[in-house]
Amino acid sequence: MATSTLGKSGFSRHGSWVEVDLEAFAQNVRSIRASLQDRADLIVVVKSDAYGHGLSRIAARAASEGVSRFAVATPDEAMAVRRAAPEGLILLLGVAVREDVAALIEHKIVPVIVSEAHGQALAAAARELDEALEAHLKFDTGMARLGIPWEQGVDVMARLLEVRGLSVTGLCSHFATVEADHSGTGDIQFARFSQIARRAPPGLFKHLSSSRAFLCSPEWDSDGVRVGIAAYGYGAMDPRFRVQTHPILQWKCRVIQVKSIAADVPVGYYGTHVTQAPTNIAVLGSGYADGYLRTLSDRGDVLIRGRRCRVIGRVSMNWITVDAGPDGDISEGDEAVLIGRQGDETIWADELAKLCRTIPYEILTSIRPTIERRYVV
Ligand SMILES: Cc1ncc(COP(=O)(O)O)c(C=O)c1O
């Protein structure tokens, strides 16, 4: 394997690595911010390790681009943002508990309140500290997930605004179904939210839209939009959208063995693929334990030497077998692209998602977090 480079450990590279282009991320962020309605602010969603891209570097780069608002799912993620973006306004989208309150106040992390009882419990914990906890009220306007049911929204809001120990500075909701032609639940959800927001005192920060709503419906921008996947370059290809962004993450590994195989040879566990003609098989140093979904067995492509090679046989825990073709031009040590670009060819996470009947979010967040992330700055 003459062309193998050394990994962080000093061993030759057996596994895979991820490359994240921070300049391309910054460009996505700039495009999104430039397209926002006048008063709207961008809240970059960096939960789940910034959708697999690496929370610290993504948050730091966003901050250096002037982004001041971030959203996360857990207190641990919030603390990682606090370290990467010391001045950032951090919104915790998950459900904080009483035991979290002291740290939330100390590190200026703003949780969402998902019910009256939740608000009361966090307020009580803050009062014990002689403090007030800053929070945003989250309304369930039709998602049937987290939030204060919209039917009770006005009354619950009125009571929580008066509770000592709680300082309500924002209101939010989350869309369930957004379609470009407005056939989803967006309009009704926005109307339900607006009905509540009209009864709120002035000056509260209001936000509803995630990527798809941001892309399809500028009229819902409100005071801020919580954008995740579009900042990472997915879901924003349609030229009808207000902005186009581009993927920033590539996932690569190396060919670790090449072998000639005759016709009629079953490949891999249970021989799900049988060669039709003599060919070469390239074995790659990555597998489902790294997050390359097993559903891609016999269906996915990878890029080697600028061309597509089909995954043949079952993806195994640490290795993938691909059809390298009969020419014999692919060698051990060659770089193989699982997600990304090589020459004129590209394979992005949305292509793999379609093959796996899932969404690019799952493909990206499935890439094992311990795989080395390398950053192009
Ligand atoms: C409450 C909430 N807001 C915003 C987002 C960001 O969504 P997207 O990545 O589609 O922009 C999510 C993502 O799951 C979310 O749960």
Image (tube, rainbow, N blue to C red):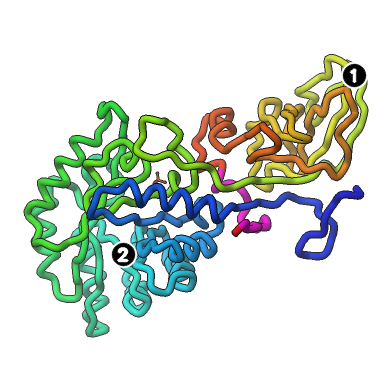
Q: Is mark 1 on a helix, strand or loop?
A: loop
Relative placement, left or right, of 92 versus 37 is right
User: Magenta segment range?
Assistant: 364-376
Residue drawn at point x = 63 percent, y = 46 percent = 250
Residue 210, horizontal then vertical, whole percent: 34, 46
Relative placement, left or right, of 292 versus 129 is right
Residue type of the residue flagged with mark 2: Pro
**Which comes sooner in the sequence, label 1 or label 2?**
2
Residue drawn at point x = 83 percent, y = 24 percent = 325
- Report which residue position mark 2 lands on: 111
Dot 1: few (<14), some (14–19), or many (≥20) neighbours within 10 Å? some
Dot 2: few (<14), some (14–19), or many (≥20) neighbours within 10 Å? many
Q: Does the magenta stretch include residue 367?
A: yes
Residue drawn at point x = 34 percent, y = 62 percent = 91
Identify whether 9 is placed above or below 359. below
174 or 162: nearer the viewer: 174
Is label 2 within 8 A of ligand 1 (CB to nearest ligand atom)? no
Residue 278: give its label.
Answer: 1
Is label 1 within 8 A of ligand 1 (CB to nearest ligand atom)? no
